[in-house]
Amino acid sequence: MKRYPLLLSTYLSAAGLMLVPLTAISEEAELEPVETPPFTAQTKLGFIYTENTSSSLSVNSALYLSYQQESWLHKGSFESYYTDADNADDGANRYTLNAGSSYDFSEETFVRMASRFENDLYGTYRKQWILMSGLGLYLVNSDRVKTSIALGPGYRFTQRQPFDSEYPDQTNYEVIASSTIDSAFVLSEHQSLGATFDIAYGEENTHYNVKTYVKNTLMANLSLVFDLEYIYNTTVAEDQSPDEIYSTMSLTYDF
């Protein structure tokens, strides 16, 4: 998948614009409360095939799991992006695994522990493993709107590609500082949207990740989702762009 050079400030502003209205309208009338089961699961699948002077096939898939037990929340996810194109520069083969738990001390504060593993066959880093911990604060915490911020220390392992022209297979271990802003808003029984902004700051590299989504329920448990992911690394190989963008339109099914 082709990576487009984009200004980081543009996406940070976009994420901010999504978070601001969520807080502003949180005091509006609440939706009727719906009983949520302790265990939830969601699958996602989307693909695009194009053919003109060249052809390409793009597939994205994901699985999200969540388990709520009183003050504990446990989450896990698998996400993948794959593009097979005639032009190798347009290819993509990347997957991410996430797992984490949080504990609510009160309606305003929580503690979290999370880990993330990324494998990318085309980016600067073939493998990245990040362990994060920290304290969090709910800026808004209602049935309709949830906005939180979390800060804390972490640890990161990275390995560069074997074909890297400067540092083939180079590995790096470093202590990092991590922060996350997360917001989700339920527009109606059939529509919702959200945004997440992550920073993993380290001496070797600082990794920025912005995710946004809009979800529209079509019928029962079937939904149409548009999401956008923007990634920026301050340290990349000389032949790589620091910017990456992944946008998808997918069908999801909630269990």
Image: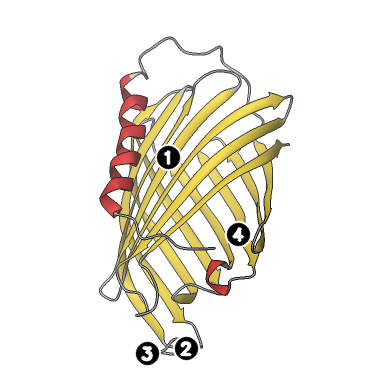
Q: Which amino acid does label 2 sit on?
A: Asp
Secondary structure of the residue carrying tag 4 is strand
Secondary structure state at the residue bearing disc 3? loop
* Cα distance in 3D space between marks 1 and 2: 33 Å
Residue in the foreground of this view, choosing between 171 and 82:
82
For label 2, the residue is: 169
Badge 3 vs badge 4, beta-carbon distance below 8 Å: no
Q: Position of residue 123 (x, y in %)?
A: 47, 72
Report the residue marked by disc 4: 81
Question: First in sequence: mark 1 or mark 4?
Answer: 4
Q: Residues within 10 Å of mark 4 (few under 14, many from 20)?
A: many
Q: In this rendering, which labeled residue sits more in front, label 1 or label 4? A: 4
State the separation of the CA atoms marked 3 and 4.
26 Å
* Kind of residue sitting beneath label 1: Ala
Coloring scheme of the render?
secondary structure
What percent of the width, then of the height, locates residue 65?
A: 64, 46
* Label 3 sits on residue: 166
Q: What residue type is labelled 4?
A: Tyr
Q: Distance between the residues labelled 2 and 3?
A: 10 Å
Mark 3 vs mark 1: which is more N-terminal?
3
Tell me the SS state at disc 2: loop
Quarter of the image where one finds residue 153 = bottom left
**Vertically, is 170 above or below 151?**
below
Residue that protrudes farthest toward the front in the picture:
53
The amino acid beneath tag 3 is Glu
Give the mark nearer the N terminus: 3 vs 4. 4
Position in image of residue 237 (x %, y %): 37, 79
Find the distance from the CA under tag 4 to the CA under tag 2: 23 Å
